[in-house]
Image: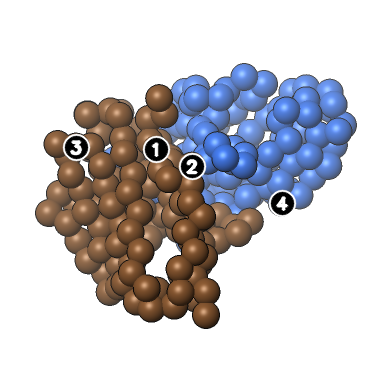
Amino acid sequence: RKEVEQDPGPFNVPEGATVAFNCTYSNSASQSFFWYRQDCRKEPKLLMSVYSSGNEDGRFTAQLNRASQYISLLIRDSKLSDSATYLCVVNSLNNDMRFGAGTRLTVKP
Amino acid sequence: EAQVTQNPRYLITVTGKKLTVTCSQNMNHEYMSWYRQDPGLGLRQIYYSMNVEVTDKGDVPEGYKVSRKEKRNFPLILESPSPNQTSLYFCASSPLPVGELFFGEGSRLTVL
């Protein structure tokens, strides 16, 4: 079993749609959680950190469920520019960052 | 400008010819790491370093070496490249404790 698992997609949604991604992790000692965005053939960039209480940044909402060991990312009012691969990243106590394989999103006109 | 710089960005080489991919960061970060990215597998960690002269193996260290003689530099060395090392490589850095990772633009390596 992979340490961090994501549905690879692809998710194909129309502009304006709401889309949600989930990510599960196996290490219960994991301490910090992140969503990164990666455009085709580019480097990953931090989209947002995920806090225990959940957090929102504009159209993006991230949530953490420690009991079930999953994190989620919700994108509202999807834009064409949201098309990318979204990577779930989990950090354990010893600074061991683990990446999911990514979920590909395509937003269509 | 705060950045992580990798070189070369693109390289085609042949089996067995030693090569080095350089990585340099100007943010005074303690933590640096190398990843390879392959289709369907996501980013897999090769080696990481918590500080100068401190390096540790990641998930896929076989066939690679690293060194951390200076805080800003973390080169990746392929002593005898093989075709299965054809991949997209990323270097990243972060302050400690590891939070946001800052990535270089990537190095696409092809081993024939």
Question: Which color was chain B given?
Answer: blue
User: Are the residues under badges 2 and 4 in a single subunit?
Assistant: no
C-alpha distance separating marks 2 and 4: 22 Å
Chain to which mark 1 belongs = A
**Residue A29 location, quadrant:** top left
Q: Amino acid at mark 4?
A: Arg
Label 1 crowd bin: few (<14), some (14–19), many (20+), radius 10 Å: many
C-alpha distance separating marks 2 and 1: 7 Å
C-alpha distance separating marks 2 and 3: 20 Å
Residue A28 visible within the image: yes
Residue at the far top in the pictured view: B62
* Labels 2 & 1 near each other (Cβ < 8 A): yes
Residue on which the image places disc 1: A5
Label 2 crowd bin: few (<14), some (14–19), many (20+), radius 10 Å: many
The chain painted brown is A
Residue on which the image places disc 3: A68
User: Are the residues under badges 2 and 3 in a single subunit?
Assistant: yes
- Locate the C terminus of chain B by quadrant: top right
User: Are the residues under badges 2 and 1 in a single subunit?
Assistant: yes
Q: Which mark is residue A67?
A: none
Chain to which mark 3 belongs = A
Q: x, y (%) of residue B100?
A: 36, 51
Q: Which mark is residue B9?
A: 4
Q: Is residue B77 above or below residue B23?
A: above
Q: Is residue A52 above or below residue B59?
A: below
Label 4 crowd bin: few (<14), some (14–19), many (20+), radius 10 Å: some
Horizontal side of A35 relative to B79 (left or right) equals left
